[in-house]
Image: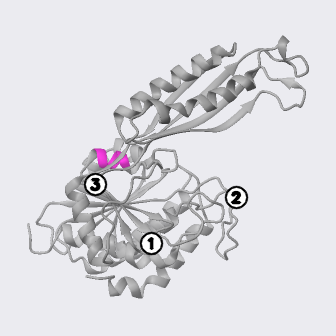
Amino acid sequence: MPIKNRLAETHAEIAAWRQHLHAHPELQFQEHETAKFVAEKLRSFGISDITTGIGQTGVVAVIEGRQNTSGRAVGLRADMDALPIMEATGVPHASQNPGVMHACGHDGHTAMLLGAAQYLAETRNFNGRCVLIFQPAEEGGGGGNEMVKEGLMERWAIDEVYGMHNMPGYPVGQFAIRKGALLAAADQFEVIVEGQGGHAAAPHEAIDTNLAAAHVVVALQSIASRNVDPVKQVVVSVCTIRSDTESHNIIPQTVKLIGTVRTLDEEVRDLTERRLGEIITHTAAAYGCRAEVSYERGYPVTINHDRETDLAADVAEMVVPGVWRDTPPIMAGEDFSYMLNARPGAYMMIGNGNGPTVHHPGYDFNDDAIPAGCSWYAEMVETRLPLGVD
């Protein structure tokens, strides 16, 4: 089954929904208008079983198949939130909310799931229930975890769950997936390095926090090069360095470092957290400073289940031949991991073509990927819940 004819016919309509969402982005747990738009579209498709406010601003809807003797339910998930970035695409549908934009393609994910929902509500060529999950706050807010904690899987009796993310750099509409760890655990840390402020012209009378902080940044790179097995992966990035003053002639009393750690297995995660604390504390002490380290574990590793990954790839192969079944892991994080920890399932990547990467102010979801994405969502339901099979 290639791209479904009905979804090719409604491509322009779905793209218009996507562009509307792009023009009206909302940050995590503020997706009130987005959720309202989603719920209104679902009602217009004839779907009546709609619940809002799950995970604060999430939406869950159920489509009953033409048959429902299997007693099974397949969950399909899309995320809805945007990022705090000033858009620089110059497209006609650019963000109307200054400082907020859909720089990760969640507008495309939401539109594709809506397109699949419209098709499934029209045809209902499956035996069981399709549970549509429109999730808030993927960008650091853990909306997926909030929905799971509120009983998403149990309340809607979901047996397996699938999600999808666009991937710039892959050919448009091409699918890629892998078994096991696909996306990384995403942890964060904050460090306060305290020394003794003073005059820049008399550094010997101060304890230079900038010097200590600079050596901390360099020393942290030894975790990947000297502590972690070379065949395993870890990223330690210091992303913010900020002192308590901005002056050309003051050595600051304190310097703050903020960063992230990305890992693909728990053993490396534990090792990295331990070594990070040791390196920061002792490196700062070597320069006469004191360091306070705060380490917070974030999203767990996104681990695709073996059987469901094969099923998802087989369906993708029916839509667009040539699925990449062993795509390299990605060190970005994803809170779909919480749903995969709660139920069997898989997370699929769909090519978005060339252009700026996600989280870039010039990024815009490629609408040419819509028919393939919608078809994969819909075909997952029809394949996993076939008519005539209990």
Structural crowding at the residue carrying mark 3, measured as other residues with C-alpha within 10 Å and reported as few (<14), some (14–19) or many (≥20) = some
State the residue position of label 2: 86
What segment carries the magenta color?
A: 337-341
Q: What amino acid is found at the position of numbered circle 2 in the picture?
A: Met
Q: Quadrant of the C terminus?
A: bottom left
Residue occupying image coordinates x 40% and y 85%? 8
Against 251, residue 105 (above or below) is below
Compared across the picture, whether 389 is left or right of 31 comes to: left
Would residue 40 appear left or right of 158 to someone viewing this image?
right
Question: Could you say which disc has been placed on residue 216 in the image?
Answer: none
Q: Which residue is mark 3?
A: 179
* Magenta-colored stretch includes residue 338: yes
Residue 380 lies in quadrant: bottom left
- Chief SS of the magenta region: helix
Mark 1 residue crowding within 10 angstroms, few (<14) / some (14–19) / many (20+): some
Q: Nearer the viewer, mark 3 or mark 2?
A: 3
Residue 264 visible here: yes
Comes first in the chain, label 2 or label 1: 1
Upstream in sequence: badge 3 or badge 2: 2
Q: Amino acid at mark 3?
A: Lys
